[in-house]
Amino acid sequence: MKQTADYITEEKRKALEIELKELKGPKRKEILESLAYAKSLGDLSENAEYHQTREDQGKLEERIQKIEQILQSSQVVSGGGGEVIEIGSKVVVVKDREKREKKYQIVGSEEADMAEGKISNKSPFGQALLGRKKGDDILFKTPSGAVNYKIINVS
């Protein structure tokens, strides 16, 4: 698996497909109805509601294109489960000189979310974890200096 490719999990693919269906169906229809209503109000040059709806329509179409591009260009990974850390793996680590364990999942950059413990395979931490095993120590550089972690578990 190349680290530079774009990856998404099966769960993310399903969520994007559901969102795309919603955007192309009900949301598009809703905006078209809003546009028709705004046009019926009269002079379009000074019609704030019309201009706002057109802006919303542009954002909607942009999001649809973005999702289609992600689905087309990303490789779906089934996710971890082995001894070696790969995209989709769930990892438990302990930071040097700390007792508290932290749980992370290695994901593609499109679904990275630190608040949910999802780390991009392209991040320095994600790159340092890839290919490692339970019991390994990893050291990687951050803007505030080098950080050392011990891998407690991989699933």
Image (tube, rainbow, N blue to C red):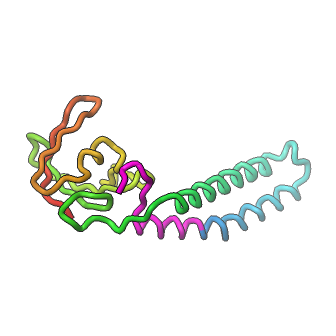
Q: Quadrant of the N terminus?
A: bottom left
* Residue 83 locus on image (x, y percent): 18, 63
Q: Quadrant of the C terminus?
A: bottom left
Q: Residue at x 11, y 41 (%)?
A: 96
Q: Is 4 part of what is drawn in magenta?
A: yes
The image quadrant of residue 8 is bottom left
Q: Residue at x 32, y 58 (%)?
A: 87
Rendered view: 80 above or below 49: below
Q: Residue at x 85, y 43 (%)?
A: 46
Asked whether residue 110 appears in the rendered view, the answer is yes
Rendered view: 73 above or below 99: below
Residue toward you, 80 or 26: 80
* Residue 116 locus on image (x, y percent): 33, 55
* Residue 92 locus on image (x, y percent): 18, 56
The image quadrant of residue 152 is bottom left
How many badges with numbers are in the image?
0
- The span shown in magenta is 1-20
Q: Relative to 44, is 141 on the left or the right?
A: left
Q: Relative to 54, is 144 on the left or the right?
A: left
For the view shown, which residue lies furthest in the front direction? 2
Q: Is 69 part of what is drawn in magenta?
A: no
Residue toward you, 42 or 93: 93
Q: Residue at x 14, y 52 (%)?
A: 151
Asked whether residue 120 appears in the rendered view, the answer is no
The image quadrant of residue 65 is bottom right
For the view shown, which residue lies furthest in the top direction? 144
* Residue 80 locus on image (x, y percent): 27, 64
